[in-house]
Amino acid sequence: MTRSNHISKVCVLGLMISLVFALSGGSAVAQTVTPGDDAGDQPGASSPLAAKEEMVRARLDRFRERVFDLRSKLADTEPENATKLQRALQRAGALGLSEQLNEIIEMLDDPAMLTGAVEKQDEWVQKAEQLLDILLARDVENPQREEEMDRLETYKKEVSKLLERQRGMRDQSAKASVLRRMKQQFEQFRARLDALSQRQGELHGTKAPPDGKDPSTDPGEKVEQQADAAREAGDLAEDMKHASESAPSQQADSPEAQSARRQAGSASEEVQKAEKAMEDAAQGLRADDNAQADKADRRAREALERARKEIERAIEELEAQSSTKGQAGDQQKVAEDTQGLSQRMRGGESQQGGEQQQGGGEQQGGQPQEGGESPQQQPQQQPQQQPPGLDNLDRAGEHMEDAAESLDKEEPEQATEEQERAIDALEQTQQELEEMLNQLRKEDRAEMLRGLEVRFRDLLGRQRGINAETDALAETGKANFTRADRLQASELGERQRAAADRADSAEHILDEEGTTIVFPRVVSQLSEDMQSVAARLSEAKIDALTQTMEGELVETLDQLLEAVKRMQQENEQQDGQQADSDQESPLLPTSAELKLLRSSQQRVNQRTAAIESMRGEEDAAAESLSEEMRVAAARQAECAEIARELHERKNQP
């Protein structure tokens, strides 16, 4: 991420926080300021409430000005963020937020209309929160990145399939090459067997020499020639034995090669028998025992014939299995599919880009404009960039074509080299696609984390306000509550429920993200506790347990914010370390999740202590405390379950 992009996204985050402050300052004004307060130096305001409401309107005006200015600056460099800001501007105009604030200010000038003003403020806040939702929206309001990620994932899967097929083709060529080399080696064995059989026949007069000359009749020389033939047979047997034991690489091995090796082993045993028979023949000649020599000669020639049959069968099988002409067509099909993917990637890029531009124009023409803008002033969506890896994909296709040609020429070794080059090019294509996907995941995660940070900051500000007003009511004492105090407690309960609803939205984001165990469970606990506090406030149960639970809510939000900040830092520092993995790394590392789990356990302990301390109080209903203990027990069981899940994930292979 470039420095300019980082600064602009920080600016967007600042705008979100400004909007949160503006929203949180609206509906609380009429409940925290009484008609008797000093109006200060606010010009043109006839009441303190109207003066404070004008401050909210000024904040909204400044917010709109900053959004408009930043939107113009991002139109070229970050069209997605510019479009999001444009939607916020358009929505603000459609909702008429400025006009409604003017109405509220007029109502606050009239003490008789304070109740109506409070209702108007609540309505204004509900509408204005839609702007915050627009700025925080991820998937629905920002489809371009999701579409691009889906597109790249599809291409990556297709490249993976091509890789698998090409590796299969490479293995077939490698096997064919091995079988061809074995066939050549076995043909040499056959030639050596034929030569040895010819020589043996010449020595014993059963075969005429090729030159037509009679063999030597010198007994001593004949003995020496027979001994040489025996040594030659021993060398051949050893070479055959070595061939039977030497397996090629695992990827190039095959049932045909294994069968040929077994036949080489059988032939080696037969040649060893021939060697022994030749040695016996030499002894017979040396002893001038022609009968013994002739008998040993027959055994030698029979063993050599059996060995030749074994080698001949092996050659026939290797001949049938080593042809590569049939593989050439399959290799050509992989090359065509690779070229087809390249064309689709290029065509999909231009087609989708055109659709985006057309869709953008329709949207621009149909949306209301803020401040009299013309449709031409809206940010134009940029066409999608060329997918990564296309050059390497084209190079892979070229190598596949060359491999198919070599296979057609019965040149498996040359084909294997070209196939290796094709595999290398496909792997580089896959890596480039994964690097781009990692970058998009990083941006997507950064946007999600920014949204979570703003939500948690918003909730923290709301919760601290609720806690402060709860503490003030606690100082008054429930026994001294007036009707206004009870109404205020009820209103605090409604605000607490609204906060719980916003916590639910954060939980939904984390559930969809799906890589963490503790984080979404803690946010779920946060929402449940907010609902429990809301119920107690609505019933005016302003006691130590309520205050303890409210304090826990602030602690939880502080810890969640700390976890989000840590993940933002780690996300910025990531350098594509998961390029070789199809799985995303967890949103939070295990150490951070353990820290959240420990804090959750500590809150269970605090809650249990608070319940125990209330057992002796007169106004503490036993049934209510029993229910709170049941909730605490369920929370304790959940902590144990989370710990078990963390342990199982850590020990996964």
Image (cartoon, rainbow, N blue to C red):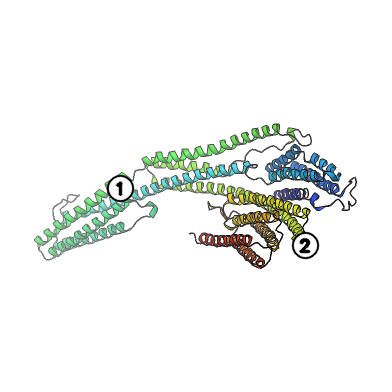
Q: Are marks 1 and 2 in contact (CB under 8 Å)?
A: no
Q: Is residue 176 left or right of residue 628?
A: left
In the visual, does 590 lie left or right of 168?
right
Foreground tag (1 vs 2): 2
Q: To which quarter of the image does residue 631 belong?
A: bottom right
**Most foreground residue, 563 or 269:** 563
Q: Which residue is mark 1?
A: 318
Crowding at label 2, few (<14), some or many (≥20) Cα neighbours within 10 Å?
few
> Above or below — where is 592 with respect to 67?
below
Residue 540 percent coordinates (x, y): 71, 56
493 versus 597 height, above or below: above
Q: Amino acid at mark 2?
A: Glu
User: Disc 1 versus disc 2: distance between alpha carbons?
Assistant: 97 Å
**Tag 1: amino acid:** Leu
Q: What residue would you read off at disc 2?
A: 475
Whether residue 287 sits left or right of residue 129 in the image: it is: left
| Kind of element beneath mark 1 | helix
Specify whether residue 75 is in view.
Answer: no
